[in-house]
Amino acid sequence: MADNNNFALPKKNLIWMVLGFGVMVLGFVLLAGGGSSDPSSFSPQIFSARRLYVAPVVILLGCALVVFAIMHKGKNNKNS
């Protein structure tokens, strides 16, 4: 039988990557909403601090976690 553990990244890095994608999804959820049911009326909720500042920072943190997960090299890597 062949060894099925030939992934490009170790399990710990994959966990970090999934966590980063989860943080990005959370950022997009924070970014959503604030629309008006009537297209002819203006809703000032689209300019809330959550949508202008918090959500983009959360999305960027998620991207940074994914980059960290891809670039991080473990201490006990046998291929060094």
Image (spheres, helix red, strand yellow):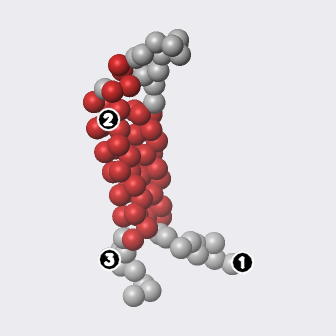
Identify the secondary structure beneath mark 2: helix
The tally of labels here is 3
Kind of residue at disc 2: Leu
Q: Position of residue 30 (x, y in %)?
A: 39, 32
User: With respect to residue 66, does 33 lie above or below?
Assistant: above
Q: Position of residue 47 (x, y in %)?
A: 33, 27
On the picture, is 22 further left or further right than 6?
Answer: left
Q: Which mark, residue 52? A: 2
Q: Position of residue 5 (x, y in %)?
A: 58, 72
How many C-alpha atoms fall within 10 Å of the one at disc 2: few (<14), some, or many (≥20)? few
Q: CA separation, marks 1 and 2?
A: 53 Å
User: With respect to residue 66, does 38 lie above or below?
Assistant: above
Q: Which mark, residue 33? A: none
The quarter in which the N terminus is drawn is: bottom right
Instruction: Name the residue beneath numbered marker 1.
Output: 1
Instruction: Name the residue beneath numbered marker 3.
Output: 75
The quarter in which the C terminus is drawn is: bottom left
- Lower position in the chain sequence, tag 3 or tag 2: 2
Kind of residue at disc 1: Met
Q: CA separation, marks 3 and 1?
A: 29 Å
Q: CA separation, marks 3 and 2?
A: 39 Å
Residue 16 appears in view? no
